[in-house]
Every structure is written in C-alpha cells, then in structure tokens.
Image: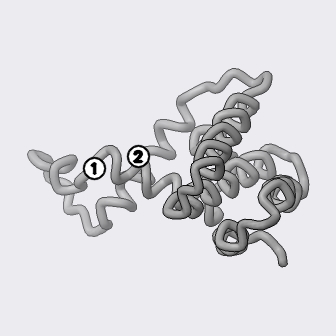
Amino acid sequence: MLLLYDGEELQSGARVMSHWAFDACEFKAAEYFRGTDVQNKAGSYDVFWKLFCRWKKNTQVYEARRYEWLDKWIELRVVGIMDNNRRNYYGECASYIAALSEVQESLGTPSSKTRIMEKYKNEYSRRRAFHQELRGYGMKK
C-alpha cells in the first residue's frame, strides 16, 4: 500500500503500514551508515522512510487495477477475523481498511475513506469494538 500511496504526508492508516514495514525490515540507521563518514542525526525510522521514498520514486507500478487486489485481500482478512471473533485483531483490520482508503483518496477517488469505512461499519453493525477501532482511524460517528 505504501508503494501505491501518492502523497508526501502519511495519514493514520498509511503511517501504521510504514511502521510495520520499518519493523519488518529491522532497519537500523547505525548499521546502514557503518563504514561511512556520514554523521547521522536522524532516527532509524526517519532514515528508513527517506530511503523508502527514494526507492519508491524509481519503482513503477502497473496502472490498471493497481489496488483492486488489495481490496480483495483486506476483505478476506476482515471476514476471517470477524467470523472467528478475533477481537485482538480489530485494530489491524481497521488500519488496513484506513490505509486502503487513504491510497484510493491519494490517487484521486474522493471520499473513499468515508465510503469504505461505512461499508465495513454497516457490514459488522453489531461490533462496537470494531467501530471504535475504525473511529480511531478517522471514521465519523
């Protein structure tokens, strides 16, 4: 999703995705700059994000239907968690939903966040804890 996101400033869902990517890479700025004369004063996350953005500028993404598969994957993940009443993962689901909607908005589809979050809120109308997680990522009451 971060590769598809078209914007300088990350919103809440995309910000979570960036931190998950950072954690998964186990990136450490000190190791990256070891053996160089670079005096790094930025934190590891800031260096990681700057490098990621530079890599992203040089990477092409196939234009047609570039986020449709993400929508399907997220839907499957949410259904699996909701069907099994895995309340511990409601926050994860909400972050994926938020990030997807932020990607769509950044690519020019207005009101995606409202539309997508409302879709999931209505689909799981009795899951108040899930609604609370969605509100944490910007869903309106």
Q: Which disc is residue 27 wearing?
A: 1
The image position of residue 22, as x and y in percent, is: 38, 52
- Kindly give the residue lying farthest to the front in the view shown: 84
Please, is residue 67 above or below residue 65 in the view?
below
Which of labels 2 and 1 is toward the front?
1
CA separation, marks 2 and 1?
A: 11 Å
Q: Quadrant of residue 67?
A: top right
When the figure is inspected, residue 4 is found, relative to residue 87, above or below; the finding is above
Q: Residue at x 39, y 61 (%)?
A: 46
Location of mark 2 (residue)? 51
Residue placed most toward the observer, 67 or 120: 120
Residue 116 in view of the camera:
yes
Q: Residue at x 79, y 22 (%)?
A: 64
The residue nearer to you, when weighing 36 against 13, is 13
**Image location (x, y in percent) of residue 18:** 49, 54
Q: Quadrant of residue 68?
A: top right
